[in-house]
Image (cartoon, rainbow, N blue to C red):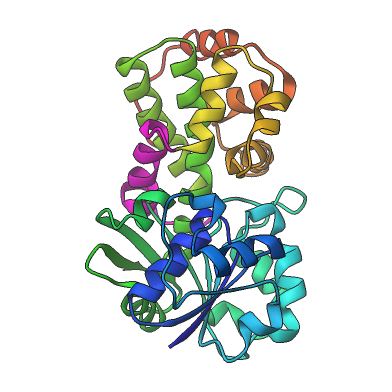
Amino acid sequence: MRAAVLGAGAWGTALAKVLVEAGHDVRMWAHDPEVARVVTETRVNPYLAGIELPAALVASGSLAETLDGSEVVVSASPSQFTRGVLAAAAPHLPASAPIVSASKGVEINTLQRMDEVVAEVVGGDVADRFAVISGPSFAREVAERSPTAVVVAARSDALAERLQSDFQTPWFRVYTNTDVIGVELGGALKNVMALAAGVTAGLGYAHNTAAALMTRGLAEMTRLGVAMGAREATFYGLAGMGDLVLTCTGSLSRNRTVGTRLGRGERLEDILADMTAVAEGVKTAESVHELSRRHGVEMPIAEQVYAIVHEGRSPADAVQALMLRGPKPEAWS
């Protein structure tokens, strides 16, 4: 099979490597032609320094060249750039190729999930050939062949099972699901909770706080997901709880790192200026703020993250506000 990966960041590169290792002919498009040149000449991507990439992985700065003859297209750009990349790619997209989203976010201006963005940009029958891949998977660990389990969701079992076979390797295990909305939202919402987890770590709080935050954060994610049409059970799986635990606890989590630095008193502008990769949760916090209001869903943790990131609230005050909320029964919905 010939596969095209649109996006040469860490995650796109890791997935391209997986597809090569699964035996496919893979081309990877880089927004920055310099990245494509470096990958071609050195077999290393600066976004995954130290990882040798297979010689069979072709990197290019041309969308037409990358997409030519592709039988599956992986969209791996940061969510806020997906629309622009796909609009540029649209004239070159093979008519019948499945489009697999690997982006974890919600578009700010429209509040659309990636399946909605793809449908709007590409049109036609794309909903029937759209899929999303998500789950607890740091790009570096995937590239290093650390045993990893993810989920691929499509509206039909047949497409999900086909993609499961396409991506599966002895160290990259793929489960199937048909809850596209839930898998997409799980991947997006957990980044907001990872910011919160980082904030509590930066403030010096330890395991009790982290456990409480992840448990109640999962409840918030589930409430919003169900209100938006997802299945509750999806949030108990790899795309929900699995990815949440990884992103809230792992040292490779960009979102947790941003939160930790915020908790230590650094300014968001300074933190983001230091980063070469995108922490999706910063933008997604704004989207979630609006979505929770639109759907009438109470999300106190997400609201405090929004207040810290976008309104300048003190992290210590945000934690205090959460702890002093009125007494409630433990409820999931």
Q: Which of the two residues, 296 or 92, is positioned nearer the viewer here?
A: 92
Q: Which residues are magenta?
A: 228-252
The front one of 313 and 70 is 70
Going 52% across and 63% down the picture, which residue do you hit?
42
- What's the residue at 41%, 60% (across, down)? 52
Give the image location of residue 291, x and y in percent. 64, 43
Image quarter in which the N terminus is found:
bottom left
Q: Is residue 64 above or below residue 240?
A: below
Give left or right: position of 317 versus 201. right
Q: Indicate the position of residue 73 as horizontal and vertical percent values.
A: 55, 77
Image quadrant of residue 329?
top left
Percent of width and height locating residue 226:
47, 50
Residue 78 horizontal/vertical position (percent): 63, 54
Q: Residue furthest left?
A: 170
Q: Is residue 120 positioned above or below 292 on the image? A: below
| Prevailing secondary structure of the magenta residues | helix
- Residue 123: tell me if it is visible: no
Q: Is residue 293 magenta?
A: no
Disc tally is 0
Q: Is residue 311 left or right of residue 308?
A: right
Q: Residue furthest front?
A: 41
Q: Is residue 234 in the magenta section?
A: yes
Question: Relative to residue 320, is residue 176 drawn left or right?
Answer: left
**Quadrant of res 61:** bottom right
- The quadrant of the picture occupied by the C terminus is top left
Q: Residue at x 41, y 50 (%)?
A: 140
Which corner quadrant of the image does residue 303 belong to? top right
Judge whether 240 appears above or below 250 on screen.
below
Task: Please give left or right for residue 41 compared with residue 119 in the image.
Answer: left
The answer to whether one can see residue 69 in this image is yes
> Is residue 243 placed above or below 285 in the rendered structure?
below
